[in-house]
Image (cartoon, rainbow, N blue to C red):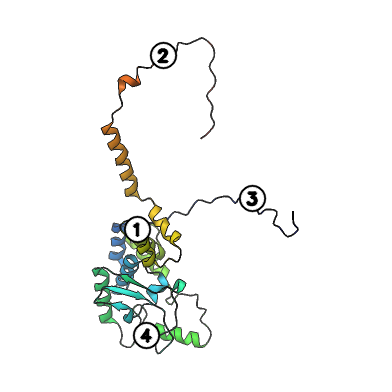
Amino acid sequence: MPPHQNPFARIKQRKESPKCVRYLKAAEFSSILYAAPDGWWQAFLLVAYTTAARLSEVLNLTWADVDFEQNCIRIVRKEAAGNLTSWEPKDHEHRLLPAPAPAMQALADLQQSCAEGCPYVFLSGDRLKRIQDAKKSGRWSGRQLVLNNLHRQFKAIRKKAGVAEVTFHDLRRTCITNWAKHLPIHVVQQLAGHGDINTTRKYYLSVQVDDLEKARQVQLQILADNPTDQEMTNSAGKTPFSGRPTKKASHASD
């Protein structure tokens, strides 16, 4: 073996089972939305659940990104200018996301209560100023969320709604899963902002509860259309008992 070759290179790694993807049912989301304390949270949750925007993308939305005429939002990079701070989408992907009427109405309602001069949809003017001051003084790492205690507040809303553990990213996953049931894979890839189509493909391969029921109904229909012939099943001859001891059945697993 060459001196620089890894002696374990040919050993296959143990395949790990994929993590279970949390899918949020429509009734569960409705409960969470009902438990939202104000219009800010309602708009935030609707955008996250219906557009599959990533958390950082939602938090960096500006009013210029919201197209009320076309009912869509734009995910685009931001240059540091005026009240804007620099920001780049993941994979540098710019895209246009369709938004349903309830999400657009929630955004329109939120806009009515927003302070003038603040370009961001989900950031207040005071919070934006603190972020800009932190960046100027070098106290901003770039990895932290632009809003504090967001996950903690969402957890409180979820508990109030009586919904099992769910994360912000689960809202995105659920939207992509819903798209995958009705749209071609290349369209879902573009909307989701996936650089690798294999990332999108797993949403097409994911099995939901309603898929299990459909599969069950398929087999039930087959049995109904092709009933087992009991006469043929019972017509096989019986082997007489020879008196010799029989072999013990093997207990080896499949």
In the picture of the structure, the residue carrying the numbered disc 1 is 180
Local secondary structure at mark 2: loop
Name the N-terminal-most of marks 1 and 4.
4
In the rendered structure, find residue 11 and report the number of the disc placed on it: 3
Q: In which quarter of the image is residue 65?
A: bottom left
Q: Front-most of 165 and 208?
A: 208
Rendered location of residue 218, percent (x, y):
30, 40
- The disc labelled 2 sits on which kind of residue? Lys
Residue at 41% across, 57% down: 201
The residue sitting at 35% across, 68% down in the picture is: 48
Q: Earlier in the sequence, mark 3 or mark 2?
A: 3
Question: Quadrant of the rendered structure where residue 239 is?
Answer: top left
| Residue corresponding to mark 4 | 125
Residue 158 seen in the figure: no
Q: From the viewer's perspective, is the residue at label 3 or at label 4 nearer?
A: 3
Q: Residue at x 42, y 68 (%)?
A: 151
- Local packing at callout 4 (Cα closer than 10 Å; few below 14, some 14-19, many 20+) is some
Q: Name the residue under label 2.
A: 238
- Which amino acid lies under the numbered mark 4 shown in the image of this protein? Gly
Which secondary structure lies at badge 3? loop
Image coordinates of residue 140 in percent, x first then y, are: 51, 81
Asked whether the beta carbons under mark 1 and mark 3 sit within 8 Å of each other, the answer is no
